[in-house]
Image (tube, helix red, strand yellow):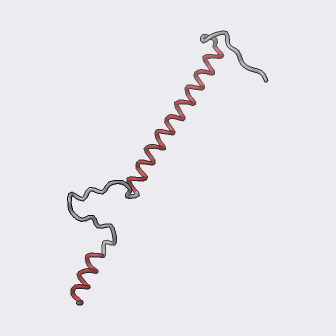
Amino acid sequence: MSMTKFAGKDDPGYVKVCDILWLWISEMEKKKEDRSQDDSLDSAQAGHGPVYSGGGPVFIGSGNAGRDITNIQLAG
C-alpha cells in the first residue's frame, strides 16, 4: 500500500488535498443543517408538537362536526 507524503503544510499537494477536504466537510455540514430544517418543518406541518389553544378547547376533527351536532339537536 502506498501513502502520499508531503514536505510540509506549505506543500502545494498538501494545500490542494486540505482544500478539498474542507470543501467536503462544508458540504456535509450544509446537508446536515438542511435536513435538520426539513425535519423541523415536516413535524410542524404534520401537527406534531404543542397545541396552544389560549385556554379554550382544542378540536381536531371534521369541519362538519358543528353542523352535525346542530342537526342531531334539531332532530331530537
Q: Residue at x 63, y 21 (%)?
A: 17
Of 4 and 54, nearer the camera is 54
Q: How many marks?
A: 0
Which quadrant: the N terminus? top right
Quadrant housing the C terminus: bottom left
**Left or right placement of residue 76 versus residue 21 in this view:** left
Q: Which residue is at the front of the view, 17 or 55?
A: 55
Residue 38 image position (x, y, % from top left) = 45, 47
Determine whether 21 is above or below 28 in the image: above
Q: Is residue 46 left or right of residue 25?
A: left
- Which residue shows up at 59% across the image and 21% down it? 18
- Residue 50: x and y in percent read 32, 54
Percent coordinates x, y for residue 26 in the rendering: 52, 30
Q: Nearer the viewer, residue 54 or 74?
A: 54
Q: Which image quadrant is residue 69 in?
A: bottom left
Q: Position of residue 37 (x, y in %)?
A: 43, 44
Residue at 20 percent across and 59 percent down: it is 55
Report the front residue among 56 and 38: 56
